[in-house]
Amino acid sequence: MTTIDDLAWFVTLAETGHVTRAAEQLNVSQPTLSRALARLERQVGAPLFDRIHKRLRLNESGRVLLAHARRSLMELDVARDRIATLRDPDRGTVRLAFLHSVASWLAPEVLRTFRAAAPDVTFELTQAAGHEILDHLREGRVDVALTAPRPDEEAITWSPLRREQLCLAVPGGHDLAGRDDIDLADATDEPFVMLREPIGLRRQTDDLCARAGITPRIAFESTEIGTLEGLVAAGLGVAIVPAPRPHRAEPGVVYVPLTDAAAHRVIGLAWPRDRPRSPVVARFAAFVTAGTGSAEGSAEGSRAADPG
């Protein structure tokens, strides 16, 4: 069977054109090198050199193999480098997924702070809905994810990071806009714009409506919180959304906190419980859960094991 050494020695032979010189360069005996060449020629089923006056000249078969051998050895070098990187917590790649709704604040914040501590780490980023993110985690397409709500399965480890108050977004000038807070039952006659199923915040919205004893009249369903806020500003209805980040409120929308104690969502870091993680991924998870988690989020409860 052809070995990596056989290919590497063949390349050296092709470049020197002389068994003695190649053997000296490779620090092997001439008989050993000759046997390796004979073994390789048997494997490919054709002579690779023409022997002319004790020199070796590549024939057509040899030129074909040389091109492929060089590419193969180059790919092996790349593979070695990547494997070494995977084992280095200061380098390597973290495959991170995150919700659309944290793309403008939490995800950049996490990336910025971690990259300041580990500038040689690279990221492969995926932005998706929560149910899609869980599929990515289960199938090994991503390593970790910023998602909500807490995954309801033992195979996913979860560490809460941030807690967001949920509000009823109403158009400016609406009768409900002047309240300090609101019982959702008071909006029973309002049209609602909602996220589509099975998005996590839609499930929370349905649960809150059920707790309030109302069956919302749905005017429109979307996949983006920003779209809901824009439609509220246009007067199409009301929506249950997270309280906006500073300076990111939708113009023309008033955000009224809900009185229900369950009216919040917790965003956390999730990763597969039993799948081995590279040192760089373990470092990232430990960094984020130690440095970004809040007291409010931690009070929500956790399934997290030691992220290291």
Image: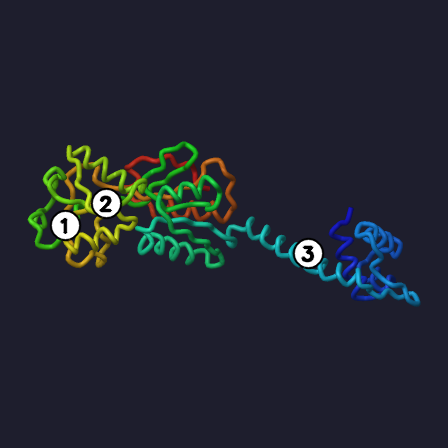
The location of residue 25, given as percent across then percent down, is 80, 62
Label disc, if present, on residue 72 of the rendered structure: 3
Front-most of residues 118 and 63: 63
User: Which of disc 2 and disc 1 is earlier in sequence?
Assistant: 1
Per the rendering, the mark at residue 248 is none
Label 1: which residue? 170
Q: Is residue 108 above or below residue 298?
A: below
Task: State yes or no: discs 3 and 2 in contact (Cβ < 8 Å).
Answer: no
Which residue corresponds to the image point at 43% horizontal and 49% vertical from the top-left? 96
Marks 3 and 2: which is nearer the front? Answer: 2
Question: Residue 257: x and y, percent?
Answer: 16, 45
Task: Compare marks 3 and 1 and give the one earlier in the sequence.
Answer: 3
The residue under label 2 is: 194
Q: Disc 1 residue type? A: Val
Q: Earlier in the sequence, mark 3 or mark 2?
A: 3
Name the residue: 31% across, 39% down: 298
| Tag 3 secondary structure | helix
